[in-house]
Structures are given as structure tokens and as C-alpha cells.
Image: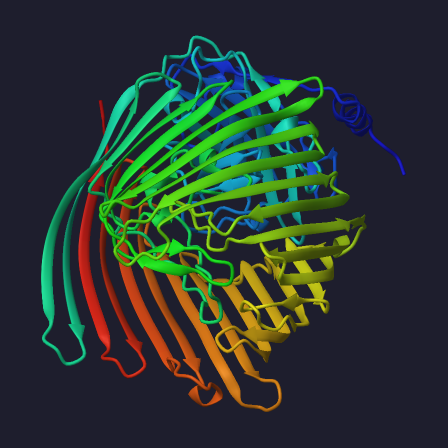
Amino acid sequence: MSFSVRQIGACVAFCLLFACGASWALQAVPATGKITLDGKLIEADWAQAPVFNEFIENTPREKVPAMVRTEVRVLFDHDALYFGLRAYDPDPSKIVAPFVRRDKVFGNQDNFVVWVDPTGARKFAQFFRVNARGILADGVWNEDSGDEDFSPDFDFEAVPVILADGWSAEMRIPWSSLRLPHPAPDKLSFIVFRNMPRDTRVRMSTASLGRDPSCFLCVADDLTGIRDLPRASGLTIAPFVTVNSSRTREGNAPTASETRFTAGADVKWRPTPEWVLDATFRPDFSQLELDTPQLKGNTRFALQVQEKRPFFLEGTDLYSTPWNLIYTRSVTDPAWGARATYRSPTTDATVLTVNDKGGGFVIIPGTYYSDYRDQGPSQSTVARVRQPFAADLGTGSIGALFSDRTYRDGTTNRAAAVDAIYRPNNETRFRAQVSGSQTDERSPLSVQGKSTGSLTYVDGNFDDGVTHFWSGVTSVSPGFRSDNSIASQVGYQMFQFEGWRCAKREGFFYNVCPGLAGKEQHTWSGEVLNRWVTPSIYVNGQRNSEWNLQARWLNYARAQAGGVLHHVPSVYAKAEGNPGGWLPYAFVEVEMGRGIDVLSDSLARMMFTGVTFNTRPLERVEIEWKLSDFRLSDVNSSAWRLHEYSAQLVAVGYLTAQDSLRLIAQRTLSKRNAAMYEFSVTPRVHTQAVSLVYAHKRGLGRELNIGVTHGNARISATPNQMTTEVFAKLSWTVSL
């Protein structure tokens, strides 16, 4: 085997820059002319900008020079930061560039991801993605929690173009979209990823990252040369108007009709670069996707659904604590809200207050089940501050959080927490949190009155890309309650652990990780709730596939106080990946064995199946299928006890780059065999919903949505309830 001078030089450079622990910096240069976003990088300024092309492959190979050439250039002017991205490809016909929804740009598509840490503290980053079709995705990364949140949408542009030898893209990120401190720094921390899915997903980056790094921003590099930036400020108002007409009918009763005209606005003001002030008045969420249906017939605890409402998504990373106390979906029908967010290299802080008109239920957590109370109008307030630190012995952060919910009937619930995160090195992390709560229940139907509670959480994690170990301890007193969270279970103490070690190999399965996990959970008085030890094996393979097999033979669980500690052995298997072609994504999970019928506290045969398919029958049509099925049957006979399933279809047709048509159809059914119970049960609960929405979007500034939603629900022999709603919503943005 022979090596060229270029190959030898690349290896030497790799050793000097990465293996030996050195770092590098890319210089941004000022643009002297206008940059037209056409993806072609033909302006004279691009030719003068320094080029970085020594990308490092981290999937499937780890920390080796990338086998395909990739280039990054950076420009800036008074208004924005520009990235010039060039992806060479030996066979451009294999570039994967589908039409997808915003924020659906993943590793199964050819794409670039630019991560920018505007403060340089390496705790928080904004990321901006573009695939080779020009579809955008963005969000925030929280290094402390390791969470990638696609919820926030930033004002940025990116235009790609397919070339004879690959593809390129130009990306423009306005300074107003970056959370820059004041005074503006002369350098930023950044990482650029390139995803190249073929038979094997190839991922490469500007930073020396492993396949599964425990810390991303720890190895981010510097972007230098930035100077004379404007002091970011400005006022943005996004008014909207909505016309809504609804018809509701219950059984054979007369149809009730209502037409509503709603006008409101979202306001964003940056008085200084550190501060962002947001407000919303009479928000309307008609255009949002329906919540994905969930199976809940065999659980006594509240389920969590994804937050999709734009106002609640700014600064979501700041609410994150080791044991999460904030769940914004607990606010069901906001009349108005306001938020102030402060970010600097030394301190992050936010205050959120929302007036909730009420509706739905407040979760009253318990040890064996969640109870509920009717939710009247309330005011929710959350305050959070976080202070990062760096020392010779490591890095981390210290934070504090306060949560208050005050109801019109006089009931108050308050919770406070302090938390800390410490990283002695890039592979090791420790977290701790102590919380307390106080509730004064004034409802005439209340049986709780005044109560207090406490929560303690500690965990530790080690991950070097080969060996992973995590362990955590949780203690929650019976009286703990946080109405701004989804703390559905209290009155327990719990110890958990998981660990695995991976073997790196060549071939279809390139990462094989056998492991072991366990849990011991008991009540405040010492009664065992859950006890299990589970061996497993986790595998990564080509086409971005992941495989998981768990032997849950030593699982024990208790469903009721004083009830039986049931032995509930089962086998769990999961597979997901990107097969390609008309099937870009597939996910299947199966569990079978024994389970508990929590309604009767009896052992039963259990079978669960979950399936998600993303199909693409036409270039401009994307269809996602989600199916879940859960069954319980008698252990000693073939008689069924519970059958529950949910199905959702989401079909999106892309008429143009700005116009789309979205159809959502979903159905849930829960049936119980009344003959198997010695007490009265609800035999059948059935719901259906269909939503059709046309959307026209011009960036983040102008949007028109027209839609219709029809739903019906029926509980056993009660009259069928049907609702049809037609709406039109127009929103636009005015910058002052």
C-alpha cells in the first residue's frame, strides 16, 4: 500500500491538530460587497475568505480525516454572519435532498449544521441547518442537559445549489438572531457538521468529536476576526387576525354554532444585546399540529405532550434543571404572557409570567396515581437564573429556580430549587438539585389544605464514547407539588443505574454495546414500587440504523398500596433506521410478556407494538404513519381484558417552497371486557379527529393559514359529541 504526499500531510496535520490536543481558529473576514444568497459562492469576498477543509469523520469511523472534501468560509457585515459551505461528492446523483417540513432535517439527508455559541461560555449554542433541497431547521443546544431542542425558530436564510461535483450553500444569520452579549466579543465558538447519508451515514465536523461524545461544546473551535458589530436592539411586532367558525352537536341535540374574530400580537424587544423581552396578547394556536395520541388506559399517571406554542419556546433551555420543574403545557388557555430573558458570558436568567384563562385539570400527584382538580383561571410565574463557572478543576454551573401558581379561588402553589452541574473533564458529569414546595389549597372541595414537600436529586455520568455509566438517586416526599410542572408521582425514593461498553468494528454493525440497567423504587414508608435488573444489547448499523434488545426477566412492580408485588417479566426489542428510497425512516418497537392490569391490580399477559413509518410516494409528498397497540389478556384463559390502540397519519404536500397542504387524521380506541371485572368499568372510549390546513409562509415574517378540523368522541353509551371548526389566520411581522 502506497500513500501520496497529500495523504501523508493530512495525517500529520490531523495528529498535530487533534491527536495532540491542539486547537485551531477560523478567521471571519468583512464582506466589502453585497452577498446574494444563491448558494454558488461566486462573489469576490468568498474568494478572499480563509478556507477550512480539514474535516474530521466521527461516524461511522471516529476521529479520522474525512474521506471526502468539505470547505467552510465565513464572512460578516454590519447586519449578519455568513457561512459559505461546500460539499464535494464523488457521485452527486446520490445526494439525498427531500422536501420535508421545517425542523425535520435529520441525518438521513445531505445537510449542513452550523452551531454557534454566541457567548463563548460553551454551555449553550444555537444551531442552524439546511439540507441540499433548501429546507431549514434550527433550535438550541443545552450542554448541561445534553438536549437538542428544535422548538425555537430563528430568523435566518440558507440557499443551496446542486453542482456537478457536489453541492454548496450560503447561509445568512442576522446578528439580531444571535444572543450576543455586550460588548460584542471578537470571537465566537462554533462547530460545522456535514451529514452525508449513503449505505452508511457519514458525519464529519470541524471539531474532533467521537461517535457519541459526552460533551459537544467542550471541543468547539474559535471563530475570530469579528469586529465593529452593531449593538443589537430593535422592536418587532407580529400581529395576527383569526376568523374561526365552529359547530358542535351532542347526539341528536340541535347544533350549536359560533363565529369568533380574534386579533392579537406577539412582541419582541431587544433593548440591549443581553436582554430579550417578549410578550403575547390573546395568542391563537389554530395552525399548530394536533397532539400525537397516546395510550393511557393502563396508567394512573398523567402523560406529557410536546410543547408546540411559539411563545413558550423562547429560552426553553434555561428552564431545564436536572429534575425538571417546568412544564409549560400546564398553561392550557393563555390570555396574555410576558417574558424577560438575559444572557451573558457569566449569567443566564429569565422570568416568565402567564395569565391562564383556565380549562382542563390541575395534576395532583400521588404515589400510586395522579389525581386531578378542575383548573380555574390562574397566574403562573417562573423565574430562573444560572451562573456558569470554570476553574482549574473543571467547569459547570449553579442555578436557582422559583415557580408560583396562584388561582382565582385563592389557592397558591410555590416551588423553589437550587441545582448544580459539575464537569471535572469532558467525559464526566455530576448533577444535583434540591427543591421544596408549599401549597395552600383553598378550594371548597379540597381535602389537602396546607402542605409542604421536598425533592432531592443527584446523578453522575461517565461517557468516553466506548464506556458509558450513569447512576442517579431521587427522593420526593409525599407532600411535594409543583403545579407548573408535570410532577405526576411523589412520595417515593429511587435508585437507578445503567452502563454499557461498546465494541467498535467494521461491517454492517459497526458499534455493538452490551449493557446492564437497574432500578429500585419504594414508597416513603418503604413499600417496593418497582424493582428490576435488565441486561441489554445496543447496536449501531449502516443506514443510520439502531437496534436494541432488552431481557426484562427480573422486573417487579406494584400497582396499589398494600397490593401484590407482581413479577412482570418481558422482552423488549426496538429497531429504527433510514432504509432509503420511498421509505426514508422506519421505527418499530415490540414488548411482550407479563404486565399489570392496574384497574384490578391483577397479573395479565401483555403485548405492545409501536410503529412509525415516514414514506415518500412522490417527491413532493411526505406521509408519516404512527401506530400503537396495547393488549392485556387473562393469564389463565384466552379472554381479553384491555385493548387500546392509536393511529395517526400526517400527510404533507409541498406545492412550492412557500406553500404546503397538511392533512392529519387520527383515531384512538380503548376497550375493556366488562365480564373480567367484579366492578363497573367503562367498556369503550372512542375519539377521532381530522385536520386539513393550507399554509403559505414567507420566512418568519408573513404567514397565512386556512384550515378545517373535525372531531368526535364517544364514551360507551353516551351521545356522540361532534365538533367542526373552520379558521383562517393571517400573521405578519413589522420591525421598528
Q: Is residue 421 left or right of residue 483?
A: right
> Toward which corner of the image does residue 706 lie, by quadrant?
bottom left
Query: Residue 249: percent from the left, percent from the top?
Result: 16, 73
Q: Is residue 382 above or below residue 94?
A: above
Q: Is residue 169 left or right of residue 122?
A: left
- Pick whichever, 230 or 443, lies toward us: 443
Q: How many marks?
A: 0
- Pick whichever, 703 or 332, lies toward us: 332
Q: Is residue 275 above or below residue 327?
A: above
Give the position of the C terminus as an image quadrant.
top left
Which coloring applies here?
Answer: rainbow
Query: Residue 266: percent from the left, percent from the top?
Result: 24, 35
Q: Is residue 161 visible?
A: no
Q: Is residue 246 visible?
A: yes
Give the position of the N terminus as an image quadrant.
top right
- Pick whichever, 126 or 342, lies toward us: 342
Residue in the image at 52% along x and 35% along y: 141
Query: Residue 707: percent from the left, percent from the top?
Result: 23, 57
Q: Is residue 47 above or below residue 473?
A: above
> Toward which corner of the image does residue 432 lie, by quadrant?
top right
Q: Residue furthest right?
A: 1
Q: Is residue 241 above or below residue 143?
A: below
Query: Residue 72: percent from the left, percent from the top?
Result: 57, 26
- Pick whichever, 7 or 629, lies toward us: 629
Residue in the image at 49% along x and 46% along y: 105
Q: Residue furthest top?
A: 228
